[in-house]
Amino acid sequence: MENGAVYGPTTEEDPGPGRGARRGLASCFSLGRLQLRRLVLKVLQLLLSLLAFVCEEVVSQCTLCGGLYFFEFVSCSAFLLSLLILIVYCTPVYEQVDSTKVKQSDFYITMGTGCVFLLASIIFVSTHDRTKAEIAATVFGFLASIMFLSDVVIMFSERRQESQMRKPEATRRAGALTEPLNA
């Protein structure tokens, strides 16, 4: 028996550069799960917390180092947490986990990070030696905390809109239960 008689062509020929599945790392990423404004905020959170951490690492000496060390810990943690959240939203991990749990975790992590980053920036401003690197780090820290907290406000308003959209449906059902059957 010849191979041609038993085995027929089962795949399409080379689809060319314009068609076909995404290849390599591009096949693992999807930016469509976040709205554009939330995606921009997430990227800004990531970049600003990284810049705050890098500027803080440039500081060579300090007189009151407690604020510097706390800011270092918070800025590094904020960078890593925002990177983690962005990875979850943009990779197939999002499909493996319940989307409501991801959104809820995102809300609480972003709120906690924004509040602690703001506190660390305030403490660092009050204890630094006013070098250019320290000033740049605090500016990036304040900007990052604003991005985190504005993301929380957007997530809160989206949650509220979703609950209000479901509310009329619940009141209609409740009204139907209180009406007499013979009406």
Image (cartoon, rainbow, N blue to C red):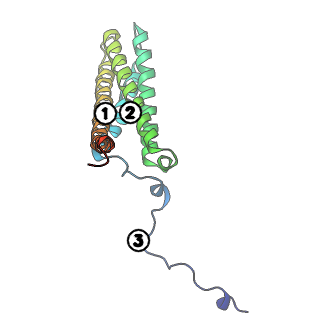
- Between residue 80 and residue 63, name the one nearer to us: 80
Label 2 close to label 3 by CB (< 8 Å): no
Mark 2 neighbour class, 10 Å CA radius: few under 14, some 14 to 19, many 20 or more: many
Q: Position of residue 121 (x, y in %)?
A: 33, 18
Would you place residue 19 above or below residue 87 in this image? Answer: below
Q: Amino acid at mark 1?
A: Phe
Q: Secondary structure at mark 1?
A: helix
Frontmost of labels 2 and 3 is 2
Q: Amino acid at mark 2?
A: Phe
Whether label 2 touches label 1, CB < 8 Å: yes
- Report the amino acid beneath label 3: Arg
Instruction: Single out the mark in the foreground, 3 or 1.
Output: 1
Residue 168 shown left or right of residue 57 in the figure: left
Q: Position of residue 92 (x, y in %)?
A: 49, 51
Numbered circle sitting on residue 19: 3
Element type at mark 2: helix
Total marks placed: 3
Q: Residue furthest right?
A: 1
Is the Cβ of the residue at disc 3 closer than 8 Å to that at disc 1?
Answer: no
User: Label 2, on which residue?
Assistant: 107
**Is 178 situated left or right of 8 in this image?**
left
Distance of label 3 from label 1 (alpha carbons): 40 Å
List the residue tagged with mark 1: 156
Q: Is residue 168 left or right of residue 115?
A: left
- Sequence-first tag of 2 and 1: 2
N-terminal of the two: label 3 or label 1?
3
**How far is disc 2 from disc 3 in space, using C-alphas?**
38 Å
Q: Secondary structure at mark 3?
A: loop
Q: At which x and y percent is residue 100?
A: 43, 41
